[in-house]
Image (cartoon, grey):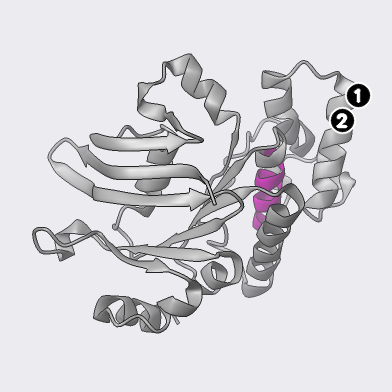
Amino acid sequence: MEAILDVESVHVRFENQQVLRDISFSVRHGEMLAIIGESGCGKTVLLKTLIGLHTQTSGKILFDGIELNKLSYFELAKVRRRLGFVFQQAALFDSMTVGDNIAFPLVQHTKKSKKAIRRIVETLVEEVGLDDTVLGKKPAEISGGMRKRVGIARALALEPELMLYDEPTTGLDPVMSGLINELMVNVRRQHNVSGIMVTHDLLSARTVADRIIMLTPLAKLKEGEPQILFDGTPRELYSSPEHRVRRFVRAAG
């Protein structure tokens, strides 16, 4: 199946510190990829590099065949409308209501009427399992799990082709984590959207993802060793012969 995203030999360095080295992988249309690894391995840096929030030092990132680092600021902004990004802490606007937060991308990037936007917002709120009574509340007035779901609803507003989730279950109790996992699965099915999820939560990764890649910090590698220690299915992760993968799996439970 054709890839929606290709990452080719990407390196990222901040001044004298290299964070990512020779990272290569693809994401196929309709596939959900989980990126795992211990703290400091560059998971979130990689996710933000994929959408141009960080710039790679070298290498190529192609979304639907478009090489992102060759785009102008305005061209990149246009491509980003085809992506949905769910930040770790939801990153909602505190001064806006929940409804206005979800509507924000539609107001900024479309010419839809207020009535049409309202209908879309109400549909999305229902889809993520919230009651429409939350629409008039501020983010501070709802729980962390609700904020996560609002963040997913906002990310879906422009009907993205690729969803990116940064630690979607961090800080949530097991019940709410399960609900967020179920929601991510449903989003993929209902919208036929590809996805990339950065997570430390192995239960979430194996529940949601078709494929998992595992990174390790460069400081723990010998010269020339690949930073991606594993690339395969969730089932294959648990039978990997690589001792560092097995140790991580045991530690993560």
Q: Is residue 244 above or below residue 183?
A: below
Q: Nearer the viewer, residue 182 or 118?
A: 182
Q: Which residue is mark 2?
A: 118
Residue 252 in the image, given as x and y percentages of width and height: 42, 77
Q: Is residue 193 above or below residue 238?
A: above
Q: Is residue 81 visible?
A: yes
Residue 253: x and y in percent read 45, 82
Badge 2 vs badge 1, beta-carbon distance below 8 Å: yes
Residue situated in front as seen by the camera: 231 or 176: 231
Please give the range of residues in magenta: 144-154
- Residue type marked 1: Lys
The numbered mark at residue 192 is: none
Q: Decide whether the magenta segment is chiefly helix, strand or loop.
A: helix
Crowd tier of the residue under label 2, counting other residues whose Cα lies within 10 Å: few below 14, some 14–19, many 20 or above: some
Q: Which residue is mark 1?
A: 115
User: Taking the image as drawn, is residue 146 in sight?
Assistant: no
In the depicted structure, whether residue 203 falls above or below residue 42: below
